[in-house]
Structures are given as C-alpha cells and as structure tokens.
Amino acid sequence: MQAFQVRAPLDYVITEVDVPQAAPGEVLVRVAYAGICGSDMHIIHGANAFVRFPRITGHEFSGVIEALGEGVEGLSVGERVCIDPVINCGQCYPCRIGRPNVCTALQVIGVHRNGGFEELVNVPAANAYRLPENVSLESAALVEPYTIAANVLDRMQPIAGDQLLIFGAGLIGLTILQMARALGIEDITVTDVIEERLATAREFGATRTFNGREQDVEAAMRELTGGEGVPLIADAACVPALLPQMLRIASPAGRIGLLGFDVKPSDLVQLEVIKKELTLVGSRLNNRKFAHVLNLMSSGRLNPLGLVSHRLPLAQMPDAIHMLDNHPEKARKVLIDMTS
C-alpha cells in the first residue's frame, strides 16, 4: 500500500509499505482523509525533537474500521471514525490527575508512531471515535485541530462577557475563533500581518481585525477597552517576541494561552505578570476533547469545511508541501484525499 514517509529532514517520498495487522486492543483503519498540519511541516524540516525517522506522519485523519484486534469491544468493522492522536500511559502524575495530554510517556500518532498518511493504519481502539451520522468523513478529519482550540480555551477559563484577542489568523487561530463563538464568546478580535487571513477571520465571524504591520494593535486594544485591557488572549501566532506585547495588552486578572513550540526565549517582564496577577497557561494537544468537538460539529455550530482551501490526492502531497513552504498565505487547511 502507499504512504507518505519522511525518511530524514527534507527527505520525504510517496512509497510502498507493508500492510499492518490489527494488534490486540487496536483497530485497523482505512484512512479516508488526512490534514497537513504545521507540526507535520516541523517534522519534515527536522524541527521536531520527538520524532524518530523514518516516520509516516499525519495526526489529523478519519476513516473506516477495516479490522478489529483481539479484545476490542464496542466498535465494529465498517464504522466511520476519527482518531485522537494522544496515547497516554494512564499511570504517571499527569494521567492520575486527569491531564493525559502531557503524560510523561506520551506518544502521538504521526510523531512517535506511524500516522494517517498511509492507506491503512493501526490505532488503539480507545482513540477511535465513532462519527455522528451527519458528520462526514471529510469534516471528521478536522476534528483534531478543533480539539486544540477547545483545549486552549478550556485552559484559559472564559467567563461570561469576556473579550478575546487572538494573535494569528492561520488555521489554529481560525479554529479558536470558531470554537470561541460556539462557546458563546461574542467579542473576538483577531490580529495578523497577512490581509488574506484577516479577511477569512472576518468571514468566520471575528468582531474586528487588525493588521499588525499597518496598525498599532496595542494602542487599538487600549482604546477599545477604555484602557482596561483584554481578559483573554490566545497566542496562535506562536512568535516568542510577541509575549511582552501580550502582557501589556492583557487586563488585570487576564489569562494568556500559549501554544507555540519555538525554542527561542521570550522576554517575560515579571512586573507585568505580578502587578496584574496574570495567568499564563500552556496548552498541548487535547485533553479528551474529541467527543465535545464532535457534538459541536454535529449541531452545526462549527464550520469545518470552510477551513479547507485545498483537496489533493496523496500523489500530490509533495506539491502541497512546496506550496506551504513557499506560499503559506495561499492555504488554510490542505486535506489529502486518501481514497483517490
């Protein structure tokens, strides 16, 4: 069968691989759709310290159960599913306190083990979520990005009436925007430096947008809030140099959600944090958010297919990578149709 395999940094190929067998406690899934994520690009560029090569990437995917491993109950061959990529040990401190997404023995499908850019893939049965009847396989491939948004918003603990400022209108910024609206947050500002992305944010319901190249975002938010500051700030730009500005923009008792994996240090002015008693929270992957997102998707409160800018067969994945490397402004979510 065919798969997209990263053999080493900047060395990737569409290749033939062996068909896996359903292991005990696992299900074999015939992949229908898989999305290219920024973390897939980090693996390709050798910027992910956790991956071991060669690796079949892909952690955003949906498909149909092809076979059941020994001992699997509650799932059936032929059922449509999407896959939570987070695999945890269940024994360590984070797992014991209900934070399995930062398990000390964490494995991520598509990073630590092979993922969804192959025709058939083995996954733990507990990680397969049955789809509601009105959620398509195409939409279901986008559940995982929404869980990222759900997780960071949960970590930020919104309160009724809170304003939200999102730095970055890429894919994750747009999912945070949609998720925040689905959760009842009404006043949402989005800032970016690419006008096309800001236009999309407005289409998706942003209350207002600011272009950071053309406008003083800090001054604009100060005026907008009467000098009080913003209670919720989500960093979907993941640029360490922006943290001091976020600290200044945040209101007293504000919460800032951080998502970036950049190893460059940020300048943290402790005075800003202490005098306002700010809360800075990291957010990694998702903490059991798949069922929640599927419910929101089924209810029509999310618009997953609106995120998709390109649909391509697996054979064209190298072209998609080239586009994402050289013209990221042209793409939102690139979805690979594994059936074509």
Image (tube, grey):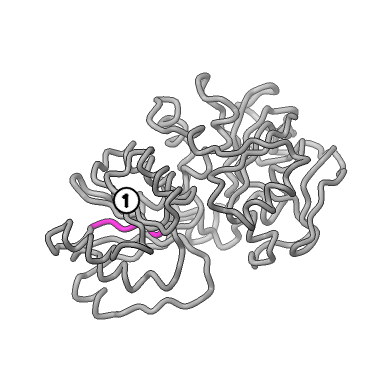
In what quadrant of the picture does the C terminus appear? top right
**Disc 1: CA contacts within 10 A as few (<14), some (14-19) or many (>=20):** many
Lateral position of residue 246 relative to residue 141, left or right: left
Lateral position of residue 261 relative to residue 311, left or right: left
Q: Which residues are magenta?
A: 231-235
Taking the view exactly as shown, the residue that stands out farthest to the top is 133
Which of the pair 283/340 is nearer the observer?
A: 340
Instruction: Tell me where residue 67 sits by quadrant.
Output: top right
Q: Residue at point 38% right, 38% down? A: 204
Residue 107 visible: no
Secondary structure, mark 1, is: strand
Residue 2 pos. (x, y %): 82, 40
Residue 117 pos. (x, y %): 72, 43
Lateral position of residue 175 relative to residue 202, left or right: right
Per the image, the residue denoted by label 1 is 209
Amino acid type for the residue under numbered disc 1? Thr
Which of the pair 319/131 is nearer the observer?
A: 319
Which of the pair 223/24 is nearer the observer?
A: 223
In what quadrant of the picture does the N terminus appear? top right
Residue 114 visible: yes
Q: Residue at point 53% right, 45% down? A: 332
Q: Residue at point 24% right, 80% down? A: 271
Which of the pair 66/261 is nearer the observer?
A: 261
Instruction: Tell me where residue 174 sits by quadrant.
Output: top left
- In the image, is residue 100 above or below residue 47? above
Q: Residue at point 59% right, 30% down? A: 138
